[in-house]
Amino acid sequence: MQLFPCPFCGLREETEFHFAAEAGKARPEPAGQVSDDGWAKYLYFQDSPKGRSREIWVHLACGEFFVMTRDTVTHEVTGSEALSGRSR
Amino acid sequence: MIRRYSAWALLREGLRDHRGWQEAWRKAEPAARYDAVVIGGGGHGLATAYYLAKNHGITRVAVLEKGWIGGGNTGRNTTVVRSNYFFPESVALYDFALRLYEGLSRELNYNIMLSQRGMLIIAHSDMEMEIAARIVNAMRLSGADAELLGADEARARVPLLNDGPEARFPVHGGIWQGRAGVARHDAVAWGYARAASGLGVDIVENCEITDFLVEDGSCVGVATTRGTIRADTVGLAVAGHSSVLAAKAGFQLPVHAYALQAFVSEPVKPMLDTVVLSLGTGTYVSQSDKGELVIGGGLDRVPSYGQRGNPPMQEQVLSGLLEMLPAVGQLKLMRHWAGIVDVVPDSSPLLGPSPLPGLYLNCGWGTGGFKAIPAGGWLLAHLMATGEHHDISRPFDLDRFATGRLIDEAAGAGIAH
């Protein structure tokens, strides 16, 4: 069982966490002017990188979303930080 | 010219110490240009090359494989073939594949050991029986075979199922597809490779794609570790690494990569003559010809390109197995592995032109690519040869994410890939 670091609760078992999305997506604005392709890209498309990946996870126990940086091949976690409140 | 396999050939070779067998396929050196290049030497890629030659007369074809043929997900699945899906588009696709599988040993002159031993999906409550009836009705309306079994019929198919008073998931009945079954996965890759090679296709192993050649906005070939190869049309059949190749071609896909695990037990005497899946545990199991139990379940929870399984899902799948079939509790596992699968939001594949003109996609099969190999190859070959969709592949175009016409089998058939 791998341990993941929650920025609020520290190291906890991986089963307490849920992958949400890749980090770095910004919701397109203004909504009324976004094309169908623009929405599709925002909602469904991503890099799915092999290697270093910045991802949004939620720690189900405390309910907080945060950014985890990990390697998708080795599963090594190199960073865990609270969301800033802005997408970036 | 390849010599046909036959009972007579087996007898002849048996009498002369098996010295007359040929190599099943030619190991080719890559040429500088082809009419068509297929990236990925798994089942889908090899089938694509075969149908390009067979259906469309395009024989100047290369299959480029990073490792060895059939060494990716084609060699890592649990060999189940079936077409028990909910939406008509899905049944059209997967039942087409199953029909091609039914004639494949004869078509390829290669025994893929298809065993249509049927598949039972167990329902554990009256509500699940209603869902089961809905799926059975949908399958029959779409032209696939399906039967709704009552509790006694389901128990008769698999007498070992845990249905005592202590059972967490009692047997209320289930969905039966008699034409479902298993096939030898390696033989599917090797059979298509041999037949394609016999029609003139070059199969090039140890040849990794490093980049795509783009001229005037169109794909005109690939750069590889074995040199530059130009082609009029390029097909991508690299499930598990689709996003990695898409990044090289300059576009994104609606795909996440996840590991999917499988397990094989030590061999035992015949005890299970069908494929059985429990809706409650998500675990499914069949028994191989060698007597091993072949066990699978859901995806790992963490996006991954590491071709190995992780303990939380191991525990879930194996505890599910013990819940379903308590009799196997003392069996040892012999092997355990994982493959990397493309997971698409609506659990349906991606078939069609890519955003880069001249490059066509066959990916996104999630946990269920093996069963679709003949159809995936047939349809990608059609796309590459004609530049147009086949009627069966049209609904699976990338454009469904913009139009909203998703084919959500996770909601429809409860298939979680």
Image (cartoon, helix red, strand yellow):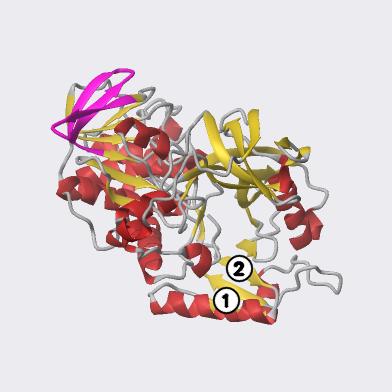
Labels in figure, total: 2
Return the x and y of residue B168 as percentages of the image width and height: 80, 68
First to last magenta residue range: B210-234
Quarter assignment of residue B69: top left
Residue B121, numbered label: 2
Q: Image check: B338 left or right of B371? A: right
Return the x and y of residue A1 as percentages of the image width and height: 75, 38
Image point (48%, 50%), residue name = B366
Image point (64%, 29%), residue name = A79
Q: Which of B289 and B359 is in front in this view?
A: B359
Q: Nearer the viewer, residue B300 or B59?
A: B300
Mark 1: amino acid: Ala
Q: Name the residue under label 1.
A: B132
Q: Would you say residue B261 is visible in this rendering?
A: no
Residue B89 lies, with reference to residue B293, above or below; the image says: below
Residue B179 lies, with reference to residue B362, above or below; the image says: below
Q: Mark 1 lies on which chain?
A: B
Q: Image check: B6 left or right of B165? A: left
Asked if the magenta segment contains residue B271, the reply would be: no
Image point (83%, 48%), residue name = B330
Quadrant (top left, top right, bottom left, bottom right) of the N terminus of chain B: top left
Mark 2: amino acid: Ile
